[in-house]
Amino acid sequence: MSIDRDTFENTSEDELADLSVPDQALGFLVANEDRAFKAREIASQIDVDEGAVSTALSRLKDRGLVEHKATYWAVTDDAERLEGYSGYERATALFNDQLGTDDKEAWREHAPQEPHPSVEDDQ
């Protein structure tokens, strides 16, 4: 997996070495939580052998951290389970450093004024 120059210069060697294939795959899926990918697509994006990614995804699935349907993989929507995974925080931090975090104010500016029709009105 490639990293930007700033991360390269400001991250310790131990921190960089500790990001395992499962951490990288999970971090990629978290960063793209609204999509599902084939193992080969994930491998290409994180620059890791497809076999290693497939093995990592199977292990992540056994832990309930990713979901698998046909040939596609997606991150779980169980936030509590993700937060309990030790590599999640580090992978998320690295991807936030690389990709930036969400700007909540920018989201609010474009959010609809009325709730989605699927949300029940409590009044």
Image: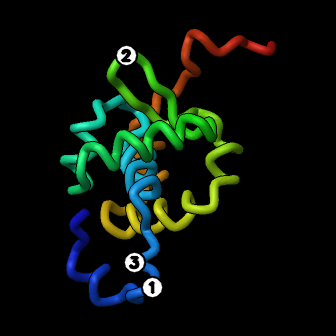
Q: CA distance from mark 2 to mark 3?
A: 32 Å
Q: Is residue 108 above or below residue 13?
A: above
* Residue 70 image label: 2
Local SS, label 1: helix
Specify the quadrant of the image occupied by residue 24: bottom left
- Residue 11 on image: x %, y %: 38, 85
Specify the quadrant of the image occupied by residue 37: top left
Which of these two is toward me, 123 or 9? 9
Counting residues from the start of the chain, the first of labels 2 and 3 encountered is: 3
Residue at 58 percent across and 21 percent down: it is 115
Query: Label 2 crowding class (10 Å Cα cut-off): few <14, some 14-19, many 20+?
Result: few
Residue type at the position of mark 2? Ala
Image side of residue 109 versus residue 49, left or right: right
Q: CA distance from mark 2 to mark 1?
A: 36 Å
Which of these two is toward me, 18 or 99? 18
Please say if the residues under marks 1 and 3 sit with CB atoms less than 8 Å apart: yes
Q: Give the residue number, with chain letter if any, for mark 1.
A: 14
